Image (spheres, helix red, strand yellow):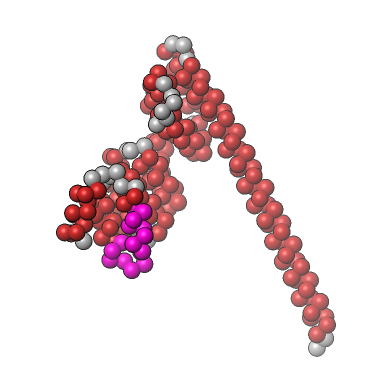
Amino acid sequence: MNYEYIAIALICIAILIIIVQVFWLYFISVKQESNIKNKKRITEVLSGMIVSVMSAPNQDCLEDEVEQVKDYVRGNILKIDILAELILELITSDEASEDDKRSVVYLYEKVEPIECFIELLKTGTAYEKAYSCLKIAAFSIEDQVPVIKKYIYSGNKDLAYSASMALSVLGDEDSMVEVISICSENYKYSHRIIIEFLDEYTGDLEALAKRVLYEC
């Protein structure tokens, strides 16, 4: 057996693997950069559209601007997601005027971006459901609590965590008692996770603590 040829072959294979890895990393980098640029472009377009909505001089113009937004985001989850983020940012902003907020609320009611996430919550992949849980919680859509609550028992850890966090943000006491009970009984969960949930809880923390002491 010629060990020299074997060594050369192994070196060539190693070099080939390194080359493939370099090209793969380059491909991922280019794709990520493209995604970032695309998201930035969409954000700029939607920001401009929202400014036009807020600047509409009358109801007819306002409705025209809203229709343009609807046409732009229709059927595109990324655009809908960015729109939802921009709307939430403006609604909760201390700098936006009341008139601007009313226009943005009108836009939200007409475009209904959150409806996309309500649908994904029921029919999407585990990742899409997990993301939708948090998005719905951010908009305080409390009527989706029963759907979100089912996922705290999911075998997918990311989905179970996101559902639990969403319920905490929504301040649903009954659900959080169950979440804390699950975490306490499952040795795979650390108490740090419970603390994370409690940090985001928007309900009556004292009332929750009393129920946990008696029921868990």
Q: Is residue 171 left or right of residue 155?
A: left
Q: Which quadrant, please, contains the N terminus?
A: bottom right
Residue range (magenta): 183-197
Is residue 171 one of those drawn in magenta?
Answer: no
Residue 41, by quadrant, is: top right
Which residue does the image show at 48% across and 16% down from the upper left?
55
Q: Is residue 14 left or right of residue 137?
A: right
- Point out residue 201 in the picture as x, y percentages from the top left corner: 31, 47
- Point out residue 163 in the picture as x, y percentages from the top left corner: 35, 51
Image: 28 above or below 142 = below
Q: Which quadrant, please, contains the C terminus?
A: bottom left
Q: Is residue 71 left or right of residue 202?
A: right
- Point out residue 13 in the picture as x, y percentages from the top left corner: 75, 71
Q: Nearer the viewer, residue 42 or 89?
A: 89
Is residue 191 one of those drawn in magenta?
Answer: yes
Question: Does residue 160 show up?
Answer: no
Image: 38 above or below 180 = above
Which residue does the image show at 55% across and 24% down from the upper left?
48
Q: Residue furthest left?
A: 214
Question: Does residue 197 show up?
Answer: yes
Which residue does the image show at 74% across and 70% down from the upper left?
14
Q: Residue furthest bottom?
A: 1
